[in-house]
Image (spheres, helix red, strand yellow):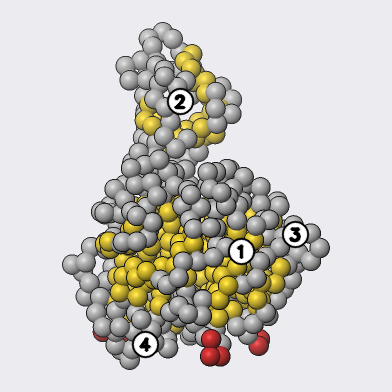
Amino acid sequence: MIILKPNLSCKSLSTYLFFYFLLTVCANIEAQNIQVSTSDGVAESAIKVNPVHPNIIVAGSNFRDSGQGLYYSSDGGMSWSVSSYPSANYSGDPTIDWSSDGQLAFTAMLTNCGGGCELWFLRSGDNGRSWADLPGNPQRVLSSNNVDKEYLHVDKHRTSPHVDNIYITWTFNGGPAVGRLQFARSLDRGRTWEPTISFTGDPRGFGSDITTDAAGNLYYVWHAYEEREIVLKRSTNGGGSFINGTITIAETSPTSQQTNGIPIPAQETRRAWIVPSADTDLSDSPYRGSIYVAWSDSYDAVDVNNPANNHMRVRVARSRNGGLNWQTVTPHPTFDRATVDRWHPWITVDNRGTVHIVYYDTRRSNNRTGVDLYYSYSRDGAETFSTPVRLTDRTSPNVVNDNFEFGDYNGADHLPDRVIGIYTDNRSGNSKDIYVAFGPVVPGACTFVDFGENGPGNGLPNAPFNTVASGVSATPAGGSICIESGTSAETITISKRLTIESTGGIVRIGQ
């Protein structure tokens, strides 16, 4: 089967039909943003690409006052539909993941928040169209009060002894135990859940994430706001128990212990939160097994009363030895620290070991109140990062008359050859919506093949019918072949499922 996919950064497209193949080719290359939500006032979003069928994607978001939005795409994020689910009491903080075989999608969310939020878990067996797949009552109630900032992770690596374990982290947000991190796991794809573990002896936090490596080791990270540190807790038995104590990943700038947020001109009311995002390199790259954590922080001590005095940056930490030791870098320029804020990062690592990160950036706003989504990547294990590129095609102005502003976090995941970010967009100035933005094709994500008679592929003079096969032409990297423009008329037969993408000019498949 041949899949012909346009460059997702295209605004203007031309279509050519040759011998029953429909091919779309870029004419102009610009950023492309796709609206996901259908309701005004949404923020705080999550997204996950199906690990087997990357054209299938599920996403979620908050609504302005209350409620939850769930969405699904069957065309790689180019269009979106609203999911159905069995209750109207959902209140937000969505989190999404998939089973390792791509057959089941999972979500967790806050519900019934009138007297302290509950935590519910749902499962979908139809690629996110509906969420009533669990037998009996389709909701599993994991906690009945004072839940906040939950996040979900599935161990999907085929060699892990804990493959398809589902892990959920959240914060207890009430009473003397406020800020205590909680953990639950399911060993049967969400049908049943083991008793919650409460980390009462560890630092309090607000905002956490979980990642796992190929051996099934579990890494649990959060912002310890009293200690002013990003910390790590580890499990070597799939969350059955945890090693005592925590490891300090990095120190954070002094902040108010009670608010956990940093006021800046674009987020002066809601404040920019220190919410870590984590992922692990599961590829066969030289950096296999590396753990990465991203968060935003102030350059200097925080002035909680004057947003203009605070300046935000993004930090990325890496560990090459199972979380024991860490090194930290900034994945963007710092010379403009006085005039540009960067925050709300999300990090993801693809199957080639490329580290992708998206974040808000105010460089196009003179007073630091307007935001765009920017993107950088690293191919050397987060030691250095590429020059940031803008993913949004319009700057979002400051959100007014809305205490929720841009929310507390955005999200991202990777497609076979690029990143897809999900974020809060206020481009109209008075209507917040959830959008997705696509990054550029990452170098190394495609195998470039010129099938022309003078190219390095297997095209030959007067031989228009050529077969692409391993050993005859280049072996695809990441399942994609980027065809360089040629002048010869040829028919290409491909014996496996591939993405064929134009890199310039007109590509003709056929005679």
Q: Residues within 10 Å of mark 1 (few under 14, many from 20)?
A: many
* Residue matched to label 4: 256
Which badge, 3 or 1, is on the more N-terminal residue? 3
Q: Which mark is residue 185?
A: 1
Could one spot residue 431 in this view of the protein?
no
Q: Residue 510 in the image: x percent, y percent?
A: 50, 20
Q: Write down the residue under mark 2.
A: 508
371 or 260, nearer to the observer: 260
Q: How far apart are marks 1 and 4 (CA)?
A: 32 Å
SS class, disc 1? strand
Above or below, 207 against 499 in this view is below
Q: Distance between the residues labelled 2 and 1?
A: 51 Å
Quadrant location of the N terminus? top right
Say few, some or many: other residues with alpha carbon within 10 Å of mark 4 (under 14 / 14 to 19 / 20 or more): some
User: Which mark is on residue 323?
Assistant: none
Q: Residue under circle 3?
A: 134
Q: How far separated are the C-alphas under marks 3 and 1?
A: 16 Å
The amino acid type found where label 4 is placed reads: Ser
Mark closer to the chain start, 1 or 4 = 1
Sequence-wise, the earlier of marks 4 and 2 is: 4
* Amino acid on which disc 3 is placed: Leu
Give the CA distance from mark 4 to mark 2.
60 Å
- Residue farthest toward the top in the current orientation of the protein: 462
Q: Are marks 3 and 1 in contact (CB under 8 Å)?
A: no
Q: Nearer the viewer, mark 2 or mark 3?
A: 3
| Lower sequence index among marks 2 and 1 | 1
Most extreme residue toward the left is 335
Residue under the point 23% across and 63% down? 333
Marks 1 and 4 in Cβ contact (< 8 Å): no
